[in-house]
Image (cartoon, helix red, strand yellow):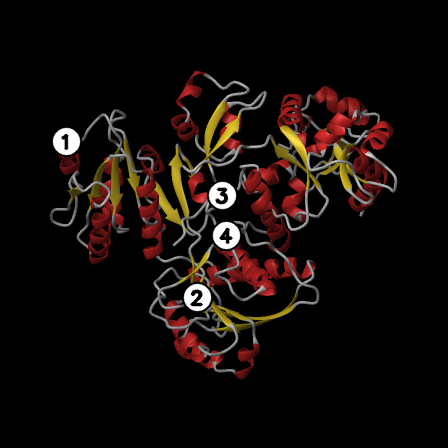
Amino acid sequence: MKRIKLVVVLIFFGWFSLFAQDKKFITYKVKEGESIQSIAKTLAITPYDLLKLNPDIQGDVAENDILIIPNKQYDPLLDISNADLTGISDRDIIVDKFVYHEVIPKETLFSLSKNYNVSTDELKEFNPFLSESGLKIGQVIKIPLQVDDTELLSKEENLQPYLVKPKETKFSIAKKFGITIGYLEELNPRIEKDGLQIDDVILVPAEVQESGDDGYLVYEVQKLETLYSLTKKFEISEEDLVELNPEIRQGIKAGMLIRIPDLLAGSKPMFIDVIPEDRELKVAMMLPFKSKRDSLNFENDRLLNITTDFYFGALIAIDSLKKQGLSVHMKVFDTENNRQISKQISNQVELQEFDALVGPLFLTNVREVSDNLKYGKPLIVSPISTRDHSDIQNSKLVQDKASIENHITKMLDYVKRKYENQDLIVIRNSSERSEIQYNRIIDELKALNPEKEVLTLSPEDGYIKPDDFKVFRDTLDRDIVNWFFVTDNDPAYLGDVFNNLGVFPEADSLMVFGFEKDRNFNKIDNNFLARVNFHYPSNSFIDPNNSAAYRNFEAVYRRKYYTLPSSYAVEGFDVTYDLLMRLASDPDFVNQGRSERIATRYDYIENTSGSIINNGIYIIKYDGLEQKVISEEITPLDP
């Protein structure tokens, strides 16, 4: 109760000053009889400066026009987007450039000073009682928010205000200024949570010139920008940026013109989250809870944990959508992971009136449900299985995770774009799975350069001997990067490949491409995966350190369920949120555009059987021991 009262008091006293002072630019509606000259005089600025803020003005202004004007009450120190938020917890409250923190057990002045990047003297200065009685559990202390003046200056130099116009979206604005949607949200944290509103004033970078025919943009480097800040801004690696612009090896200077990838060229439009007024949806879930068993063993039953985690994530998604005005009626069925029970459930007449059915989890059960509801109303969403669904003839079927066949296509498309006459080595295995993949991969790689041989490393007596790798290494070209391709996920095979390639000398420049990364990779030393610059496709990717969406979800999940969310909990949220948000607009998934959720990209295409499959696949690489999404894959290839 004490904490709740504190929140109310702080908000009451801090609201008005914050509201007036945390935006550098605000909007102004033109009144009858006003002109550029009269408005500029009232604001004590020159007409030139006013026109510079509003470049769309043609001639003079008219009544009710919306202009961007400077906010005279703006205090940059109160704009927390410029502040160092390292160490700020979910329990902290930020008001009027101060953090209000409730002391918890085991905290000391020293630990607080380290965590919030302030000195102990500063803590005592703003909390005089600490010098008298010391730090006590439950106390609320006042900590100054640290503002990076260098970063603030950089923003002042390199950004400009922009007035959001009707029908503009994050996608259209990002494309207009040659940046990613993620960077646009980083510049304007409010729009990540609240979306864009007409007549919002947001910050955008210096305008980027038009794209050339080669798929690149020309960008003018701004004051205080560095090689590092440019790689973050355009989500490109330092190596790739230097490769496009060799002259920047000598240093980055303001005014330089550099080439960057046109990240949004040729991509599908982004799906815009809009919930029509009074929209209602009915959704059913068919999940294997095994509720009729005498006892539930969460310690050893992996499927039960997957099911409950998925369900918990879905509940958070539904709760979030309800708060946004969507009315959702959900019914849950226990399939017990049984084909016959799945069939009986899907025979129920009431399901014909549902908008969507999420589940079952396994392909054999999906087939039964699909047969029964082939001509019904609901979409049937297969949320977990990556097995090939293309033999199921049902236009209502939605496979939410791309199959290995789609992964191979996506990875090979990436390889074709990046190929520059590297040596190509395909590593075979003796399994049927490897042989099928090998034949497809070898045919497509040979087409890259018909005059150059694609080499093969094959097993003998069921495994690849270390001496085979050693002999093979002696034949490699040391002057170029050698590209290796793995064709199986068998644990012994993977051990042979990475335990040998991972210890190649640094003089051997190599890169390994896989077509999946499942649990069989867990026993591979991450240092080996990093050493070989391992690349692989994935249906999902979470970077907890750089994803505000994940951190928000994690906080909600921990409050509700008192534990950290698993990857299946995130999947449950993503699948349910994206499905219902799309259904609220239109059931035509294929033509709705792309969307990005916490860990999943949705880019629906029509499968060969006429069903629907999500082709939003990430290409991920090891950058040292970190795993990163390759920026080029922000714009997926059209199928």
Tag count in the figure?
4
| C-alpha gap between disc 1 and disc 3 | 41 Å
**Who's the residue at 36% across and 38% down the image?**
526
Residue 524 pos. (x, y %): 32, 42
Q: Position of residue 538 (x, y in %)?
A: 40, 49
User: Circle 4 sits on which residue?
Assistant: 566
Which residue matches tag 3?
264
- Are dots 2 and 3 in contact, CB under 8 Å? no
Q: In the rendered structure, which disc, 3 or 4, sits on the residue that comes first in sequence?
A: 3
Image point 87% across, 42% down: which residue?
32
> Is residue 385 at all visible to an observer of this figure?
yes
Q: Residue at label 2? A: 361
Q: Are marks 3 and 4 in contact (CB under 8 Å)?
A: no
Q: Earlier in the sequence, mark 4 or mark 2?
A: 2
Between the C-alphas of marks 1 and 2, the distance is 47 Å
Secondary structure beneath dot 3 equals loop
- Identified by mark 2, the residue type is Leu
> Looking at the image, is mark 2 or mark 3 earlier in the sequence?
3
Find out whether the residues at labels 1 and 3 contact each other: C-beta distance under 8 Å. Answer: no
Residue 414: image quadrant is top left
**Label 1: which residue?**
475
Please name the amino acid that badge 4 sits on: Ser
Which of labels 3 and 4 is toward the front?
3
Between marks 3 and 4, how big is the CA–CA gap?
31 Å
Q: Say which of marks 1 and 4 sits in front.
A: 1
Q: Residue furthest front?
A: 59
Q: Amino acid at mark 1?
A: Thr
Dot 4: few (<14), some (14–19), or many (≥20) neighbours within 10 Å? some
Along the polypeptide, which appears first: circle 1 or circle 4? 1
